[in-house]
Amino acid sequence: MTKDNKINYYREDDMIRTGKKLNIPFSPPDISGLEIQEVTEALRSGWITTGPRTKQLEKMISDYIGTPRCVCLNSQTACAEMALHVLGIGPGDEVITTAYTYTASASVICHMGAKLVIIDTQKDSFEMDYDKLEEAINERTKAIIPVDIGGVPCDYDRIFKAVENKRNLFKPSSPVQEALGRVAIMADTAHSFGANWHGRMTGNIADFSSFSLVGGMNVTDNLCRKIA
């Protein structure tokens, strides 16, 4: 322990003993003149919703992750719900997701009227138990929403294997489901922009993927640096 570290340690220990509060800033934003300039130019352009800058962002992201295209909506939640609409999922269907996630991963399933099936995490892991995931797949299962956590992608090989092992149970109820021919994998990649799984970028692994621009997410923090 260095001298400076010892000083900080004793200061923190003294704060604990005396009951004084230790103020640790949570995720302070890194905003420079460049970000301010970009926001100002966007406001001056007259486009306050979808416009040329949005289309530029869509192209930059699709080029970066290696997909033919991407679409910007108002939130990751909206993207996930749109994918469920595209798949034609509704009452009588089941959609599986993990217990360790933000509420949006589950609420979109409920919004569609489908049954929410939650899989617990593995021991000492943030990832869902993939064996229990496979066990939960039945003839009513139409989609799985795996959730990448803290920049770490899920084990997509294991997820695809679970789906393939249960392919014989799949009963499509829409033209898109029939064309896919198996349970759809809809990745919640809000935490993992810029990560890759065996050489493939997140956003280009699952059938559908949805990133997030909310403060603190990888896209917000790293997008300009990664794709500039």
Image (cartoon, rainbow, N blue to C red):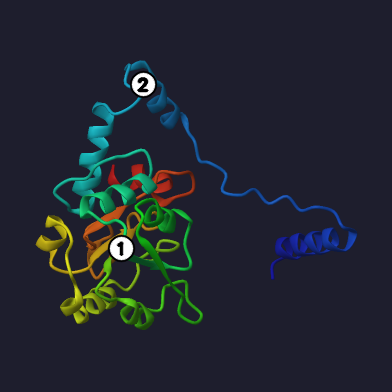
> In the image, what residue type sits under mark 2?
Glu
Mark positioned earlier in the residue sequence (1 or 2): 2
Q: Is residue 30 left or right of residue 8?
A: left
Give residue 134's quadrant in the image.
bottom left
Residue extending furthest front?
92
The one of 9 and 53 positioned closer to us in this rendering:
53
The one of 22 and 48 positioned closer to us in this rendering:
48
Q: Is mark 2 on a helix, strand or loop?
A: helix
Q: Is residue 175 left or right of residue 193?
A: left
**Can you tell which mark lies on residue 92?**
1
The one of 60 and 131 positioned closer to us in this rendering:
131
Residue 145: x and y in percent read 34, 63
Residue 175: x and y in percent read 12, 56
Q: Is mark 1 on a helix, strand or loop?
A: loop
The residue labelled by disc 2 is 41
Give residue 147's quadrant in the image.
bottom left
Is residue 115 visible in the rendered image? The answer is yes
Q: Is residue 64 left or right of residue 212?
A: left
Up-down relation of residue 181 to residue 213 (above or below): below
Up-down relation of residue 58 to residue 77 (above or below): above
Residue drawn at point x = 37 percent, y = 63 percent: 115
Give residue 132's quadrant in the image.
bottom left
Up-down relation of residue 79 to residue 15 (above or below): above
Q: Is residue 70 left or right of residue 188?
A: left
Residue 42: x and y in percent read 35, 23
Residue 157: x and y in percent read 25, 75
Q: Distance between the residues labelled 1 and 2?
A: 48 Å
Is residue 145 visible in the rendered image? The answer is no
The N terminus sits in image quarter = bottom right
> In the image, what residue type sits under mark 1?
Gly
Residue drawn at point x = 21 percent, y = 60 percent: 207
